[in-house]
Image (tube, rainbow, N blue to C red):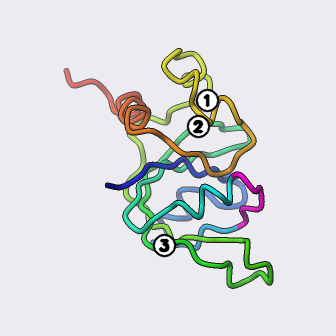
Amino acid sequence: MPKYWLLKTEPTVYSFADLVREGRTVWDGVENNVALKHMREMRNGDEALIYHTGDERQAVGLAQVVSDPYPDPKQTDPRLMVVDVVPVRPLARPVTLAAIKADPFFADFALVRQGRLSVVPVTAAQWERLLAMAEPAES
């Protein structure tokens, strides 16, 4: 059973559009111990929301984790882990942090409680709610 994650990135450094253009990337640069713990729990086949930080503060796309975690080949510290990620599709409608915070359903969501984390676990229920917020209602 795949797990769900939210991966934060500063879009001026690396955006979802960059991931789409490249087709695959090594998700690196995570140094926070709690975020690294989450990275170590990721598995090939897990799903991820790509979240733009900075001025945007919104989930913008879906991606899939396509490797188990492994030590960052660019670093000498074996604690620093990375995973490979491929794009799935952009969200039909970005989901803003303001919209997430305004919904009491997300009171326990790590994105709300631990806003500085760059890798955030998402429960199946939270995932479904976020995707519902991102997809326009059928008319």
Mark 2 vs mark 1, CA separation in Å = 6 Å
Asked if disc 2 and disc 1 are in contact, CB closer than 8 Å, the reply is yes
Q: Mark 3 points at which residue?
A: 68
- Position above or below: 89 against 30: above
Q: How crowded is mark 3: few (under 14 residues within 10 Å), some or many (20 or more)?
A: some
Q: Mark 2 points at which residue?
A: 58
**Could you tell me which residue is drawn at 71 percent across and 36 percent down?**
115
Q: Quadrant of residue 91?
A: top left
Mark 3 vs mark 2, CA separation in Å = 26 Å
Q: What stretch is highlighted in magenta?
A: 29-34
Q: How crowded is mark 1: few (under 14 residues within 10 Å), some or many (20 or more)?
A: some
- Where residue 110 sits in the image (x, y, percent)? 62, 36
- Tell me which amino acid carries mark 3: Asp
User: Which residue occupies the extreme left position in the image?
Assistant: 139
Based on the picture, tell me whether residue 44 belongs to the magenta stretch: no
Left or right position of 15 against 42: right
Q: Which of marks 3 and 2 is nearer the N terminus?
A: 2
Q: Name the residue under label 1.
A: 97
- Position above or below: 50 against 26: above
**Could you tell me which residue is drawn at 47 percent across and 52 percent down?**
48
Q: Which of 6 and 51 is in front in this view?
A: 6
Q: Residues within 10 Å of mark 2 (few under 14, many from 20)?
A: many
- Tell me which amino acid carries mark 1: Leu
- Tell me which amino acid carries mark 2: Gln
